[in-house]
Amino acid sequence: MNSNKRKHLPDPGPNCPTTTTISTPTPTPTPTPTMAPRFSVHPLSKYRLAFPTFAEPKELTSFSYDDQRTQHMDNRSLKYYHPPSLSPPPSLFQGKHRQIKRDSTVNEHIHGLLNALQTLPDKQHQQQQDISADFVMYRGMITRLFTTPYSLRDSWSMNAERAADGSGTIYIEDNLSPEDLKAKSEPVSEMHENLMYSGYKFETLCVLDKLPPPSTQQLEERLDAVVNTNSEYCSVFRTKLGSHSIISGAEIDCIDGIKPAEFPSRQYRELKTANILDTRRKTESFERFKLLKFWAQSFIAGIPVVTVGFRDQDGVLQALEDIRTREMPRRVRGKPNMWEPAVCMNFADQILHFIKMHVSEPSPTQYRVAYDARSQEVQITKLENQPSFISLSQKHQQL
């Protein structure tokens, strides 16, 4: 890859070196009685090192979920960016009672990602080194690792399983217990529901099904479009953090223009919402917490820009801002109580090494990787009698 392409990579800051090397509910687990390995998050100073190598994400394939949540190995759900009009400012709460919600009580595991990987050997242009990796997981799990040093109050739990085919690949998924899934169907406060909906509504107001420019009729229909959270477009890509090769999948909100054959991530765009930053306290909170997550999500997937829609307390969209991923760390640099990208990346690098060391036995043995906010440690526990989450069911093979 030449230097002209390298300059498009959204990097975490000017001092971070990058490379372009392409290389249904489950039963309660039974831990083994052995002592579980632990990794202390503290002190954060041990991650203030040079940036680990990070390879520009290379898309391997992509897939879509349609409005009925059926998976297709194509780009039918890819949307095109076209900014909404703020004259008059639209409401992000409008149409909430008509929305079609994805069934959040169904644990999809990582079946969608695994299905996509199953199709790769059929693509003649794919090289074997492209479709092998040390880790396979959705972007959300990598984001979780990146942000843990600055989200110490947020406990989390993942399942990990090493492939039994001799490849050494470790598959990781979110650990969703039956209780977790049940909680997702329980009522929430109206304020919480409004905030959740407003993000989806903002996405609907920013995208088109066809390439711009849109007709007046298309823009009018977009204002009243029904939000359907079943629909999703996902990019599957390969990257590398330090010595760890990773294949991941990420939901992509939209793209600028026609999808190119090479490195489409350079034209992908994230869409986010936030409260209007009308006080110093709100601004500090936005930069300390939201901007950290925006950066991690976008950086991991190689997405260069995030469009943020700022809403008032009544849910009315008042402003738009395009924030480039590479500028986010610079925006918080030198400010008190803010995050450092090198700490995020080095912590993730060291945790992946910790997982490699202790997720040692192959499937069907499964491991629980969990961060406890009380002890502020990551612990790995070997589980027994757990069904494999990397074995595709017949249902998921029928695409």
Image (cartoon, helix red, strand yellow):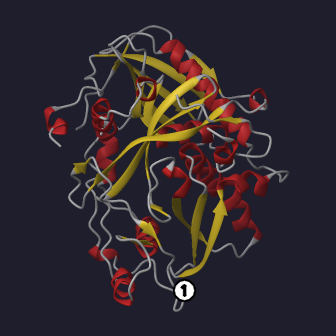
69 vs 46, left or right, is left
Mark 1: amino acid: Leu
Vertical placement of 28 versus 278: above or below?
above
- x and y, in percent, of residue 115 in the image: 27, 37
- x and y, in percent, of residue 316 in the image: 52, 82
Which residue is under mark 1?
Answer: 86
Which is nearer the eye, 335 or 12? Answer: 12
Quarter of the image with the N terminus is top right
Residue 375, visible in the rendered structure: no
Q: Quadrant of residue 387?
A: top left
Which is nearer the eye, 380 or 340? Answer: 340
What secondary structure is found at the residue carrying circle 1?
loop
Vertical placement of 44 versus 354: above or below?
below
Q: Residue at x 44, y 55 (%)?
A: 252
Q: Residue at x 75, y 46 (%)?
A: 13
Which is nearer the eye, 303 or 2? Answer: 2
- x and y, in percent, of residue 308 in the image: 58, 67
